[in-house]
Amino acid sequence: MPALALADITCRFAARDGASAPYTAVANATLNVAKGEFVSVVGPTGCGKSTLLNVAAGLLEPSSGTIDVFGQRLLAADGVNRRAGYMFQADALMPWRNGIDNVIAGLEFRGVPRAEAIAQGEEWLRRVGLAGFGDRYPHQMSGGMRKRLALAQTLILSPDILLMDEPFSALDVQTRQLMENELLALWAVDRKSVLFITHDLEEAIALSDRVVVLSAGPATRPIGDFKVDLPRPRDVSEIRMTPAFATLHREIWAAMKEEVLKAYAAQKVA
Amino acid sequence: MRLRVLQILVLALLIVFWYAMTAPGLIPPFYFDKANRAAFFFGEPQKVFWVIVDWFASGEIFPHLGITLLETALGFAIGAASGLIIGLWLALSPTASAVMDPYIKGLNSMPRVVLAPIFAVWFGLGIWSKVALGVTLVFFVVFFNVYQGVREVSPNLIANARMLGASRRQLLRAIYLPSAMSWVFASLHNAVGLAFVGAVVGEYLGSSMGVGYLILQAEGTFDINTVFAGILVLTAFALVLDGAVGALERRLMTWQPKAGETEKV
């Protein structure tokens, strides 16, 4: 039984002006994430990767298709996917809460007593390398620190599924590799299922067990599925140098290239 | 420090100018036909000063000032609270917002100071007619800020809180309210000022107590020095109120980045 099973998902959005045809972002997309598996989804920009992730999170109801979470149907009426944690691309920290209060927000919503929540929060701050920064507000932190804080905020709830939407795309290359390694280290502890969205193929290969390639939008669907059997534990900056990585990169890029060019051409026309 | 000296110098120059232009016989009258006319119309700074000193020394001013400040505080508190609640409600309920939209717009475009005589009829000449005027002025400033603030909460922030397990009620407490509060604080200086205006205008139009009443009385007897004294006392207290709001804002809004702040690590 997969941790997350998206079956035949189609998402159509009504056009803004109401007159033109609805826009189909995702069409007949099927995607499974096994328990403990790290799956990356790559695709050209604007192809509906985030749409797919929002569907998996239960934030967006698909026009058709089903979502099963550990065998249980996810229905829009029941709200969001309770077993998933979501790390957003943009900053989603509460600016009026300091570090520790941001980290324990989820525990607070679940009614965990404050003293206990703080203890857990401090532990998580330490794990993401922010020990002693709990009293800082998000605006007093760098981009990398904010990402760590967001990671701690999500992981403290110990979600069975981790959904990540280009979480490190706003970071500089060095900070990014550091964060990728830290993510792998944290993930290795208890091997949650991860669905990781990115447009960066190297990042996808370096992190994942499996890379899924999406077609260019509109009507995005998976067109390639590649197993990444590089040994773990990995160091993301070193693994990029290995021949096995280069072979995989060539292979997946061959599948992706055409879609990227298509997306580029479509953007030029529009 | 240098700046402070220059600021005081400007004040001193203004007072000297005022004194020179109004002191009877100091310079020959060039506009009025009699030497004491300028003093009649514009008052004399030293006399204004003594009126103020006398007010505070005898304690005569305190009940009046107390009433004016009470009206201001009540007008502000009631106006801000109702603006916050109704702003939150309309921002979170699209249907109610669509229905109420033209009425809100209409009420806001109305020059609300004209309501003062009606309030005097409804609530009498006591403090409540002034409070009511203050409320109508404060309400809309706070209301529009909250309404705008709630609608502009980042969808990311809401989605994130939902994924972290926030219920609708918790969303309101943890996301919408703090977000709206930052907009309320942005309008607070304005709102306190308007509550003060409501109180004084209300007193001026009919009352038996308050600094506005003192001004009205003095004007009735052409006592320009007392009118100016009242104006100066009001100005001083408006500044004090503004300073208090600023201090409160700095205390409660520590999470907001200040311009040019470099505290990042």
Image (cartoon, coloured by chain):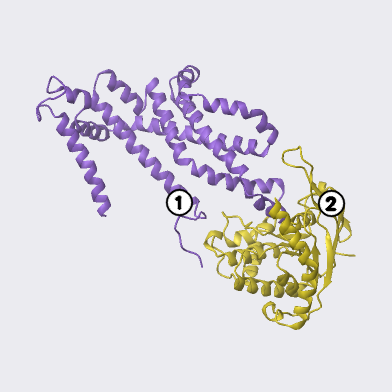
Chain colours: A yellow, B purple
Q: CA distance from mark 1 to mark 2?
A: 49 Å
Residue occupying the far top of the picture: B121
Q: Say yes or no: labels 1 and 2 on the same chain.
A: no
Which label sits on residue A10?
A: 2
Give the x, y percent position of residue B51: 23, 31
Q: Which quadrant is the N terminus of chain B positioned in?
A: bottom left
- The tag on residue B211 is none
Alpha-carbon neighbours of circle 2 within 10 Å: few (<14), some, or many (≥20)? many
Of tags 1 and 2, the one toward the viewer is 2
Drawn side of residue A2 relative to residue B236, left or right: right
Whole-percent x, y for residue B39 in the image: 18, 26
Under tag 1, what secondary structure? helix
Residue B250: image tag: 1
The residue shown at (79%, 42%) is: A21
Question: Quarter of the image holding residue B261?
Answer: bottom left
Q: Nearer the viewer, residue B23 or A247?
A: A247
Callout count: 2
